[in-house]
Image (cartoon, grey):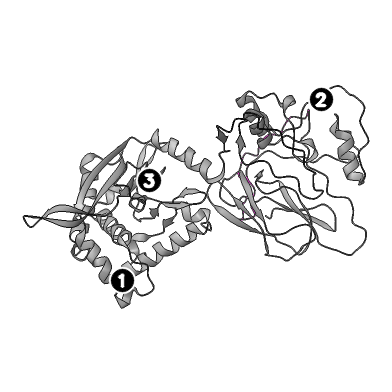
Amino acid sequence: MTTMTETSARFREFKMPDVGEGLTEAEILKWFVQPGDTVTDGQVVCEVETAKAAVELPIPFDGVVHELRFPEGTTVDVGEVIIAVDVAPGSGDAPSAPEPVQEPVAEPEPEAPTGRQPVLVGYGVAETSTKRRARKGVEIPGPAAAAIQAEMNGHAAPVAPTVPETRPLAKPPVRKLAKDLGIDLATVTPTGEGGVITREDVHAAAAPAPAEAPAQAVAPAVAPAPAAVSVDAAGRETRIPVKGVRKAIAQAMVGSAFTAPHVTEFVTLDVTRTMKLVAELKEDKDMAGVRVNPLLIIAKALLVAIKRHPEVNATWDEANQEIVQKHYVNLGIAAATPRGLIVPNIKDAHDKTLPELGQALSDLVTTARDGKTSPAAMAGGTVTITNVGVFGVDTGTPILNQGESAILAVGAIKLQPWVHKGKVKPRQVTTLALSFDHRLVDGELGSKVLADVAAILEQPKRLITWG
């Protein structure tokens, strides 16, 4: 099933796809094409950000871009048309632009389907209520009617006489948002196509009024982008809409913190031998082309500890009241990106050799920093490592990723005085913190896992004898 429709034999529409199982919306980050540009089947036309990752969208047909339905920065529901393409340019006079999507004012929403529709990843649809398009010849009540009809006919709208106020145009999720924020939709200035009130309009109405700015002309093919932030008149506060990856992080962290009973244990240790091993591996021809750093050895140490104590690699199934033990390790690595913290994972990390693990770590970090991490790369993690030491932090109490049993925080590695062989010497020292779900990992098990990781980092040769 594809996310495209035909408005005529000449024009085809491409809808916002479900780029990750179960996602309902995505934000348009960047358009790579503009009206009048030629596109070919498979060409990337825009980049969108979902609650999981930034994804590039290819268009599934050839033609010339006729219209971009939404500007950059707009959050669009899955199933909404985002671009219209002329697939037969030069075949005659172009008809008027496709009719704008209008929500029926008084018509109740149809019931959602009972089963999930088939989804082709990248071009699927979400389980949402059916959206209907206003038909030609049907009278649209309210002041917007003349403008909409005029746009269809391709000429300026006449000045409408004074008429009784009608219900503001807005989708059900936007109405709910306004209700939750205590905003009267009748007081909101719409910026959406056809006079439709958007989420951004409601947020703008809820925020302190910024200083007035002169009105801007509206381009015929692309509407103006909504403001990303709002600043109060005194310049003392800035409000930033929470969406995309940041919104998903917030929801997941709250869900995890108030669902799984967290316990965190700490250990401070001498990692001088590990740092020597890192230096040696950098010169090893078998590791040529692999980014070698302490995180690689720490990741391998955690995998060995999990192998020795497999009960820690599990998840809590609340619905079935079961502990589900995993016989594989998808090792999550927390990565800071311009869009926020994300946690992609290395699939089947337990099966990888040290060079393979190093290459996988390098690829994961590079992809994350480039903003190219796919939703699939962030799904299915079992345990996670977060390296707060890169910011000069000694340690922390990390919150579990939802559905995972443990997360290891690695602190900064510093030269410190340490008792070594009965004498105080400068040694490379760090602190580890292991948080775990106390429903399925008790204190003994959590302590054994953390102690094993520490023992390996103090004596890296244990990677051979234990691994």
Residue located beneath label 2 in the image: 166
Q: In the figure, is residue 227 to the left or right of 151?
A: left
Q: Residue 467: tell me if it is visible.
A: no
Dominant secondary structure of the residues highlighted in magenta in the image: loop
Outermost residue, front side: 234
Mark 3 element type: loop
Q: In the figure, is residue 178 to the left or right of 405?
A: right
User: From mark 1 to mark 3, how far is it between C-alphas?
Assistant: 32 Å
Q: Position of residue 291 (x, y in %)?
A: 37, 67
* Residue type (three-letter) at the residue carrying disc 3: Glu
Which residue lies at the image location 58% right of the left edge and 55% below the top edge?
55
Residue located beneath label 1 in the image: 282
The mark nearer the N terminus, 1 or 3, is 1
- Hey, which quadrant is residue 399 in on the image? top left
The quadrant the N terminus occupies is bottom right
* Residue type (three-letter) at the residue carrying disc 2: Thr
User: From mark 2 to mark 1, how far is it between C-alphas?
Assistant: 71 Å
The mark nearer the N terminus, 2 or 1, is 2
Task: Tell me whether circle 1 and circle 3 mark residues in contact (CB < 8 Å).
Answer: no
Mark whose residue sits in front, 2 or 3: 2
Q: Position of residue 371 (x, y in %)?
A: 53, 56
* Residue type (three-letter) at the residue carrying disc 1: Lys
Instruction: Tell me, yes or no, whether the highlighted magenta stretch contains residue 124.
Output: yes
Nearer to me, 374 or 334: 334
Mark whose residue sits in front, 1 or 3: 1
The mark nearer the N terminus, 2 or 3, is 2
Query: What's the magenta region?
Result: 105-127
Residue located beneath label 3 in the image: 404
